[in-house]
Amino acid sequence: MHLPVQLTWLIPALPAAAAAMIAVVPARRPGLGAGLALAALAGSLLLAVLALGGALADPAARLTHTFTWFAVGHGAIRLGWLLDPLGTLLAVMVAAVGLLIFTFSLGYLRDDPRAKQFFCFLSLFAGAMLGLLLANSLLLLFVCWELVGLASYLLIGFWFQRPAAAQAARKAFITTRIGDLGLLLGLVWLQDSTGTLLLFDGGRGVLEAEALGSLAGATTVGGLAVSTAIGLLLFCGAAGKSGQVPLHVWLPDAMEGPTPVSALIHAATMVAAGVFLVARVFPLLAADLALPHAPVHALSVVATVGAVTALFGAAVAVAQDDIKRVLAFSTVSQLGYMMLAAGTGAWTAAIFHLLTHACFKALLFLGAGSVIHATHHEQDIRRLGGLRGRLPVTGATFAVGMMALAGVPFLFSGFWSKEAILHAAHGWAISPLPFLVALAAVALTAFYMTRLLAEVFAGAPRGHGAETAHESPAVMTVPLVVLALASVGLGFLGTPWWPWLQRTLDPTFKAEAGGAGLMAVSIALVAAGILAGWARYGRHPRSDARAPDPLARSVPRLHRALAARLGCDELYAATLGRLNAALAAAANALDRSVWDGCVRLLARLGAYAGLVSRETDEEVLNGGFNAAGDGLRASGRAYARTQTGDAHGYVWMLAAGFVLLALAVLLGGAR
Amino acid sequence: MIALAAIALGTLAAAAVALALRDLIHSALLLIASWVGIAAFYLWAGAEFIAFAQVLIYVGAISMVVLFAVLLTRPPTAPATPVRSGRTVPGFLAGGAVLGLLAGAVLSSPLPAGMGAAPAFGVRELGLKLLGPHAGALLATGALLTVALLGAVVLAAGRGKEDAP
Amino acid sequence: MNPPAADPLAAGLLERLPLLARDALTGALPEPWRWVANGLLAILAIIVVFSSLFALLTLAERKVLARVQNRPGPNRAGLPLTRFRLGGLGQPLADGIKMLTKEDIVPRGADPVLHFLAPVVLLALSLLTFAVLPYGRLLVPVELEAGVLYFFAAGAATELALFMAGWASRNKYSLLAAMRALAQLISYELPLLLAVVPVVLLAGSLSTSGIVAAQAGWDLGFLPRWFVLTPWGFASFLIFLTAALAESNRSPFDLPEAESELIAGHLTEYSGFKYALFFMAEYLGMTALAGLGVTLFLGGWRAPLPFLEFVPSYAWFGLKLLALLFVFIWIRATFPRLRIDQLTRLAWKFLVPLALLNLGTAALWALTAGWGPALQPLRWLGAVALVAGPFVLLGRGLTAGLRPRTYRFA
Amino acid sequence: MSPLQACLLFSSALFSLGLIAVLVRSNAILVLLGVELMLNAANLNFIAFWRYGPAPAEGHGVVFVVFALAVAAAEAAVGLALVIALHRHQRNVRLGDARRLHG
Amino acid sequence: MNSWPILSLVVLAPWAGAALLGLRPGLGDRASRWLGLAFSLSTAALGAVLLAGFDPARTGLQFVERHAWIRSLNVHYHLGLDGLSLVLVLLTAAVAPAAQLSGWGRAGPARVPTLLLLLLQGAALGVFLAQDFFPWFTCWELSLVPAYFLIRLWGGPGATRAAYQFVIYTIGGSAFLLAGFAALFAATGTFDFGQLAQLGRDGALAERLGPWGVRAAFAGVLLGLAVKVPLWPFHTWLPPAYAAAPTGTVMLLTGVLSKMGMYGFLRLLWPLFPAQLHAAAPALLALAVAGIVLGAWAALRQEDLRRMLAYSSINHLGYCLAALFAVAAAAGGERPAEEAAAAALAGLVLQLFNHGVTAAALFLGAGILEARAGGRSGLGDFGGLRATAPAFAAFAGVAFFASLGLPGLSGFVGEFLIFRGLFGLHPAAAVLALPGLLATAQFLLTAWRRVFHGPVQGAAAGFAPLTAAERSALVLLTVLMILPGVAPGLLTSLTHPLVTAWAGHLPR
């Protein structure tokens, strides 16, 4: 039984409808809201699985369903749904992870009076995200794209009374909007060039040969192919959403939201939407590869940005003290990884990593949430420690997640997906840099994850929260266990020996042999990272919260710089922020002084003209009129004497006048 | 032509005698007769509607007002001696002069001769004219009549105190 | 529209009977004389028919009044010089002989010419009005485009005669009564005219035969399209009837000549033949107004039901006329006389505004003529409301606060 | 003499009669009646010119007379009301006595 | 169809209400308010009738009423309606009742302000429906009178000066407009828009006026309209007026009256002077883009909520102007340009409607805030309002995000279409306008953060719950912000053939 493509809309509509219903549910029935959200998402999951089944039945066939939104000009704005392995697989992932995280939230937000709103926003997010994945139209994708942004904004600012949360929400929205403007421009350009925004439309879609050919064939400013320019603009949006350097600044701040939000939106799904977009429009991005004289290939930019981000995130994560910040920078780094993979052409590897990363990063965040929940909102790893015994389930599952992320060989999914990426980067002909960066990031990842695990779970408690911690309820631990199992099992979908996932996603995929050496290198790097981390943090755990970080002792300046996130926020504030403020001030001043001044000047001129005119009137004109008036009055008095009051007299005058007139006419006529 | 002459002579005679008589009531009645004569002229000229309107308005309405006015303003006692004003002769002279002037003008002007067929301008055509191009004027006339009526009532009624028994 | 009534051959034999009779009498004459003779014949016919009708009407009035008052009425005079009483059918003749042989008194100091002219003018003018009534499909004495206007122009002149009578009598009662009668006539001329205007508006014609033509046809197959059967037409008809009663000095508006008012009004100084003329003129005026009412509202000479159309049209006219005259008499027998202030109040505060509003209703009716069958109930409801609402409201205003009058000087 | 001229002569005579009445008679009512006569004479002209004029089908003369009749009615009503008011003020209707507004 | 003069009814119904209110000086507040609401709803009722009878496939005028008015001037009472007018009539139908409802909470006599609002509504409708310059201009100027009194008598601090500035400035603009049309009339002898447009299309206008005459007339009309919209830099009357005017008035000012100017651009300037506008369009486009960007940036600096929203209006109307000028600057004849122009114009019409509703909702929100803060509307006077007034925050949030152009709400589709057209016709302008979009988000979210987020402070504490009137007005406007965002076809289908025809008639 497969889902008919015409009913695809049900998948996003169920959670969206749930969101609308929850919004009108009375606030005193929070359980009802949560139940609605869970039921709707479960329904979506079921439908998504059915859709996946349909898509897998024939991976090459693209089930599409398009409809007209409204008519413009001679054409129309058309939207549509697309059921292909890429979208449906991710939809299943989103729904499944979402369901687990919803369940976790039941426990995490049990005491929050605004849990209803929370589930409302979460459902809204889930609906938009599913819509984004299943859209066959870039416009519909953009609509959902913005809606997930809205949900992200609302959820980051869920505790809006905390100024930091409010600030972070705004920052997230505006930063991603910068990228979105690029995306919007790209869409507009695409619409203008091809006349449609449908991905696949029976040969007329933007991802189909005809359009790609014409886009790659035309050039625009700077000798860029139009497809390159559009692809880069689309990538702007992807970079913003996926926290790529330089638009990564919002993602760590977004950790101000509740932890399930961080897990769902800012680790597993929404931030991966950028990667999904790149994978989705990969044919467009790759269209310029065939051009011999392109000044720059779009994919090169993607790969470079991804590499920089991967390294940057991993490096900064090393020096963070907030458990969620560490994970956030780890996310940035992993997203960079995925971009790198996509940029080097292995978009299937990117999606593979996206899937596994979604599982283990959600697991890690939920684990962190469990820790935070257990320790009464203690997030600073310097005041945690020794939780291994107190939170056994959380600790074990967190360790699974850590090993998956670090890429511990063979058993854990992260290893396989990372292998695929390394393999692709190694094979990239244009530059060896991404490969080297990826290798560095592998080691760094293993290092900082070991540090995190050691700091939180090993040793002795260093704060009050950690001392009094006890395990979270089952509603929170069960999702952890499920996710941990998935973090292990998912990896076997794409091993070099049986690359089912890659083949499913891309029927043209060919597994390349000869990865054994590479695998050995990466295993060695992982081992080195873990050992270094253990040596620094695990062997001699900190005894006191105020004790300096071991790294800060050895390389203080580097540590300070990394802890300050390499000063990106400050740099932006000093340059772009100040420029913006200055322009705003200038615009305001222009209004208040220049234009308003012009108006005032005109007004004063008008007043002066009025004054002159009045004087002229009084002195010159009125004199003449007064004289004329006097004369009239005198003549009137004279004329009044003829008014005798005798009606007959008047008639006589009339008759005489008539006779005179008639005579005049007659005689005059005779002449 | 004979009919016209008869109508004209009758009308003029009635009018002339009316203006010469002392007795106001007889004057008024004779004037009414002359108005009827004018209506007859209208009938003769083919203006049927105007003729009936003339009768309705002059004989039916104005004559009543005139008669009322005459009765209301009759001196308590008829004047014993008619007041001879010195205007009679000049008046007739002036009237004659005007008549001469007009007659001279009429007779000396080149006017279309001959009698055309009676024009096809019936009540329907008149109505279309009145309610079509002249609708505004018609409305204005209605307003004028209303105002005149009210004004006449106010003028004739005077102050209530005076008339109270 | 209705078939061209001008074609005599299209009508039945009965219908053409009067014309056949006329042609039998004048057919032999050459053309201009024949025209004159036809005219004279028509005048003669009208005079004869309506004079005899007048005579019968006096009798009928007395008989009906008597029956209403539960007494026999005149039943003695019959065929002269015989013993046939014919239920008093000879009464008019007897009355006529009495009138003609009475002494003709002219008061001293009266204006003899005017005193004589008044009844003559009155009678002449009353007879003139008959000229434009369409008595039958083929019986229209004078076809005038402005026939209705003519009727009222001729009718308006009766006021003059009344004044002449009052003034010429050199009697202050006569004069005062004449003035009062004039006030009444003028007051009621207004609603009378205003009641006619809607008919003219809807018929789109001032000619009497045109108005009859506008009432041709049947609604739903059997309901005649007489104007009286429309909301505005019904209201107009009632107003017309009331005003016509007042115009012809009939009870309950017979103040000008009622004995209890000002002796006998302008008739005080008249006797004999002149009095008879007045009497006759009044009845003729009433008959003419009734004829106009029949023409304007009751479909003129048209049959009331489709299958009754075989009856000649003039018979229908006559029947309707008689019925209306009977109503006049009936009203006289039923209603008490109005006081002079009630009389004027009724005219100015009730009939005139009502007639004006009714004019608006008629205009609405004309504007909504294009409405389909579905909207017809709405049209009717609206029109009925527009007619009934003001009637109720104005009627309330007319009687509101009315108490028995207190006479300060009596 | 054409019919039109006859009509015009008729109306001129009527006009002159009215004028003489206005000039000679001192009774305000008669003066008013004279004015009425003059108005009627004017109406006569309208009808005559309509009847024999260039465009009788246009009916300008008739329309004009309709309005003139209405105005004449108004004039008569107001004029005679004035006469009655005059009578109330000075107990006679001699025009010559009514010169209170003498400037 | 029926022959009822339905357009006259549309225009006269609010005026009839005003007359009724004017003739009953003793009318109580309650009765006045309900009466005002009922008569302001007349536009909605009649608008529904219009909608039912409207044939979108016809691009010409419908429901035309044309009667000679002043023959000597060849002035006609000419009303007509096409898709554009219909959309604006519907907009008025939505905004006017909300504006009436917004005043229900205010203390003091209600009769006169209600009356003036009705007058304003009728005048705006007259502008949208008149097809002859004379009645059009009459309504155009007539709208100033009630607005002046409303600002002057019921406005906040600085109302006197703001009212004077508003009226003098706009009348000044109108004077140029009138002068321009006087020149047109002198040259053509007609005031009829249709005839003038025909002449303008043929180039006969330029022939009769001469090269400089036509430029002067164009400049005059342009100036008059530019002040009304307003086009940057003729906008300085707007922030003080919007800041000072009472809530209902400012809702009508921004929701409806600013659309009058835009309507004038579409109905008058463009059809009458296509060649002149074509020549001047690049410069004007620069001004429009400057309005978008600088308006948004200036809004960023405002400390007063109302002034900020006023600048946001300048910013949003800048999109409309930019779309129009880009289309006017374009050369037609090729399919892509036509498509882009159609998109831009469709977006323009959508944006007109959406901005009207959204801005009205935003100002209504500002008014509700003010009413509870004792007249204060500074951004710093509030904080954490979302905690104390969640329902109000939800409504305001919808309006904020609609204004920001969030997909799914009304603002997005219009802006997308405008950008799509703008890019197709003039890519540089589209790119230059992008910072405006960003700054819009920035100032709106900053304001949102300062007023609704953060700890509860200032007037947010003890925030009285929404009254039924406020709630109904907000619900009405919210529905109208969501509906066109989800189903823009509801509106675009009304104007689609018209817009396509416009785009098809670009000069080659």
Image (tube, helix red, strand yellow):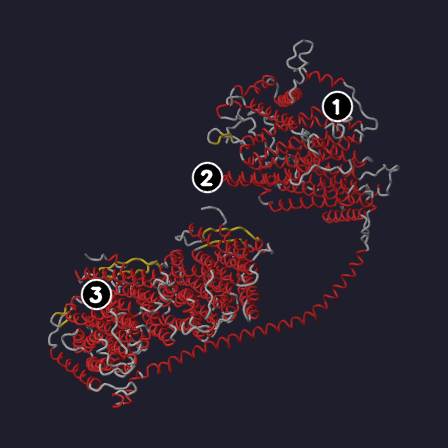
Left or right: residue E284 compared with residue A628:
left
Q: Nearer the viewer, mark 2 or mark 3?
A: 3
Secondary structure state at the residue bearing disc 3: helix
Residue matched to label 3: A89
The extreme front residue here reads A468
Could you say where residue E253 lies in the image, as x and y percent from the top left? 50, 64
Chain under label 3?
A: A
* Structural distance between the alpha carbons of marks 2 and 3: 65 Å
* Structural distance between the alpha carbons of marks 2 and 1: 58 Å
State whether residue E206 appears in this view.
Answer: no
- Same chain? Circles 2 and 1: yes
The extreme top residue here reads C82
Q: Nearer the viewer, residue D28 or C104?
A: C104
Labels in figure, total: 3
Task: Kindly check if marks 2 and 3 are in contact, taking CB atoms under 8 A apart as contact.
Answer: no
> What amino acid type should be assigned to the residue bearing mark 3?
Leu
Residue matched to label 2: C372
